[in-house]
């Protein structure tokens, strides 16, 4: 406006200076000018405008808006909070650019270089496709890395030259300076974190229920690093963090007795050269090491520090709290926090698992809230008659099974601490089948059970075996159950997933239905029982395929290319699938064999989740879908905190204290 104070005009000019020596250094300097204007300081107006005392309201706000708009145009906004002169280094608020949000589903999605100067986050835009966003302190603009679509769980090399990440069932690395990604090795499923060690290896967790593995930073054979100890009832090793000397790797270990509430997990360390393992800490979901000789660990949405002997791999002393309100998914143990040996830290503010709202969404994306209280739900399944909804999660049960009555309201809890997976309704709606991890089992067994949907009787075991069994669908006549099962190679220790069928008539002997070298999962039968839709990564990334159920030849790829979570319409004339947060429909014809049309995008209201997770359920008439999504809004997933002096700011993280 013509009445903009001259001091603000000079401020904007300094923001736009090409010469870095003359350009405004940070928003902290701009704040001084803006505070003067807000306070009503007298200033000369622009030429031709009347002189007056500026009003402290809209003019200052407009000036601040312009300054911040310049920051948005540059990428992330850097804002240093007010600090006392005695505080070390700088603290910043980093805002994700407009049109993007941080992707936080199930994984740690932020990474920090060893010197704290490079920050990498996974973001999604209106296309709902995750990508890597990089900010370097030497660069004015943050940049999206090309060819990083569908990336997750980034981590940086010790020299800060490479970013490691996962996508399409593989480990990749991509140069920070720019260039195409390089595929290093396959993974077997839902990865649970990676770390780049100074010993030249990348350590990672290839799937949810498997031990740690490693691959050379130059690619090659994948090697097992740990093994799940049946005598200790272990079911997962995840979220690895390499110690600076490359001699050991911290990781999170959880047991069959847990209901996926990772605040009850323990932190262990392994020496890859010898295989030696030590329990470091009980009751933590993730941990990081500072060279000052401290372990930082997460519990209940807060961070704690405790003295740690990295040579002996032992905690020495009592923990103290160093941060509160850090975004944490207690259902997977993922914490949105990253550290740098130089003492910096990057984190997403928030807390423990978000609450989710259940809603109906029509084909155009219009939402209508369902009469179900918000809670940390993470799976759902609509009954065949559309009048009840099975839910996994809920208040007081991180992975328990509930049934909501959509007509009368109210929730019925069916399990208590059973760690439920993939609930599936019988065709008549009388029972629910689900996977469950046996608590206290010494054989690392998983069961598939079913029980009445009204909870009137105890669960009956249908089948049990090695970890990873979960049901996916019933045959239309209710006489067979389709389920997934993990298969671990005895030599490589890598895990694949196969599809099985279980006849429900005695003696209930399961047989493999779709097996082989790739990951196959999520098999669902068509309403006429003739066709099996399923997910396979045989094309390099998860995609939806169809094949005959009972013999016959043929195999058709439905998604183009990526897709998970297939669902048939009740009349069998459509197939739905999810790609990230977007729901697609594909018209199909089965009168003369099988044929499929082109995928059509419906809406992008789905929650980001793993391949096998049930995030939506079509209604019988096909006009709408039951879904869940975060009830906290997008504000908490657009701003991160970067503290270059995090360690020095907390006396408990400095050497000798």
Image: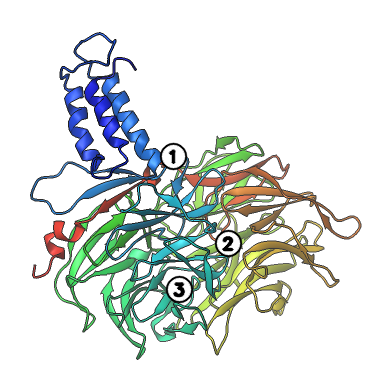
Q: Position of residue 512 (x, y in %)?
A: 70, 78
| Residue highlighted by disc 2 | 611
Mark 2 vs 1, N-terminal side = 1
Q: Is residue 34 left or right of residue 454?
A: left
Name the image quarter holding residue 116. bottom left
- At x 84% / y 73%, what residue is drawn? 551
- Helix, strand or loop for disc 1: loop
Q: Is residue 553 left or right of residue 193?
A: right
Q: Is residue 24 left or right of residue 419?
A: left
Q: Position of residue 509 (x, y in %)?
A: 70, 80
Q: Give the label on residue 205, or none.
A: 3
Mark 1, Cα crowd under 10 Å, few <14 / some 14-19 / many 20+, is few
- Helix, strand or loop for disc 3: loop
Mark 2, Cα crowd under 10 Å, few <14 / some 14-19 / many 20+, is many
Between 323 and 344, which is closer to the camera in this rendering?
344
| Residue highlighted by disc 1 | 98
Rendered view: 374 above or below 302 = above
Q: Quadrant of the N terminus?
A: top left
Q: Quadrant of the C terminus?
A: bottom left
Between 503 and 538, which is closer to the camera in this rendering?
538
Q: Position of residue 559 (x, y in %)?
A: 70, 57
Mark 3 vs 1, N-terminal side = 1
Between 52 and 239, which is closer to the camera in this rendering?
52
Badge nearest the viewer, 2 or 3: 3
Q: Is residue 259 in view from this perspective? A: yes
Gap between marks 3 and 1, in whole Å?
A: 33 Å
Q: Is residue 443 in view from this perspective? A: no
Mark 2 vs 3, N-terminal side = 3
- Helix, strand or loop for disc 2: loop
Badge nearest the viewer, 2 or 1: 1
Gap between marks 2 and 1, in whole Å?
A: 28 Å
């Amino acid at each position: 406006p013509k009445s903009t104070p001259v001091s603000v005009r000079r401020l904007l000019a300094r923001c736009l200076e090409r010469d870095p020596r003359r350009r405004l250094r940070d928003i902290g300097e701009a704040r001084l000018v803006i505070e003067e204007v807000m306070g009503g300081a007298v200033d000369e107006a622009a030429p031709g405008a009347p002189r007056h005392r500026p009003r402290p309201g809209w003019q200052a706000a407009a000036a601040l808006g312009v300054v911040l708009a310049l920051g948005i145009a540059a990428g992330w906004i850097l804002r240093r909070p007010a600090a006392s002169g005695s505080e070390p280094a700088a603290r910043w608020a980093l805002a994700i650019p407009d049109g993007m949000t941080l992707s936080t589903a199930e994984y740690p999605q932020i990474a920090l270089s060893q010197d704290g100067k490079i920050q990498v986050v996974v973001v999604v835009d209106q296309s709902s496709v995750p990508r890597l966003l990089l900010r370097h302190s030497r660069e004015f603009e943050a940049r999206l890395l090309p060819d990083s679509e569908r990336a997750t769980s980034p981590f940086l090399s010790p020299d800060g030259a490479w970013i490691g990440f996962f996508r399409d069932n593989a480990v990749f690395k991509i140069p920070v300076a720019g260039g195409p990604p390089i595929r290093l090795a396959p993974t077997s499923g839902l990865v649970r974190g990676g770390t780049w060690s100074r010993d030249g290896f990348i350590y990672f967790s290839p799937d949810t229920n498997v031990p740690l593995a490693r691959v050379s930073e130059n690619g090659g054979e994948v090697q097992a690093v740990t093994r799940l100890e049946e005598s200790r009832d272990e079911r997962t090793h995840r979220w690895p963090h390499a110690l600076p000397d490359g001699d050991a790797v911290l990781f999170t270990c959880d047991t069959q007795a847990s209901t996926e509430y990772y605040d009850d997990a323990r932190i262990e360390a392994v020496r890859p050269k010898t295989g030696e393992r030590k329990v470091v800490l009980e009751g933590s979901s993730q941990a990081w090491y500072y060279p000052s000789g401290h372990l930082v660990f997460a519990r209940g949405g807060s961070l704690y520090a405790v003295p740690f002997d990295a040579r002996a791999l032992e905690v020495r002393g009592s923990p103290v709290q160093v941060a509160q309100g850090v975004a944490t998914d207690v259902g997977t143990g993922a914490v949105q926090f990253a550290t740098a040996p130089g003492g910096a830290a990057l984190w997403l503010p928030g807390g423990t698992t978000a609450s989710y709202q259940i809603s109906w969404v029509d084909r155009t994306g219009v939402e209508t809230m369902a009469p179900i209280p918000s809670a940390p739900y993470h799976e759902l399944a609509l009954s065949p008659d559309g009048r009840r909804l099975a839910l996994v999660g809920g208040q007081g049960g991180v992975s328990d099974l509930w049934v909501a009555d959509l007509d009368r309201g109210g929730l019925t809890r069916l399990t208590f601490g059973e760690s439920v997976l993939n609930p599936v309704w019988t065709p008549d709606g009388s029972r629910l089948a689900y996977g469950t991890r046996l608590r206290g089992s010494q054989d690392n067994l998983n069961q598939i059970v079913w029980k009445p949907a009204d909870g009137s009787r105890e669960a009956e075991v249908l089948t049990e075996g090695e970890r990873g069994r979960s049901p996916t669908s019933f045959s239309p006549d209710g006489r067979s159950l389709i389920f997934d099962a993990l298969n671990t190679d005895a030599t490589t220790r890598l895990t694949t997933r196969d599809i099985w069928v279980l006849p429900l008539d005695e003696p209930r002997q399961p047989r493999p239905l779709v097996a082989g070298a790739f990951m196959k999962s999520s098999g669902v039968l068509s309403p006429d029982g003739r066709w099996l839709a399923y997910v396979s990564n045989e094309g390099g990334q998860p995609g939806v395929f169809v094949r005959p159920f009972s013999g016959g030849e043929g195999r058709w790829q439905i998604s183009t290319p990526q897709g998970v979570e297939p669902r048939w319409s009740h009349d069998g004339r459509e197939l739905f699938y999810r790609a990230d947060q977007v729901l697609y429909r594909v018209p199909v014809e089965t009168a003369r064999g099988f044929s499929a049309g082109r995928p059509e995008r419906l809406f992008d209201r789905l929650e980001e989740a793993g391949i096998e997770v049930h995030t939506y359920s079509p209604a019988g008439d096909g006009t709408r879908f039951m879904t869940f999504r975060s009830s906290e809004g997008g504000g908490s997933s657009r701003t991160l905190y970067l503290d270059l002096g995090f360690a020095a700011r907390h006396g408990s993280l400095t050497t000798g204290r």
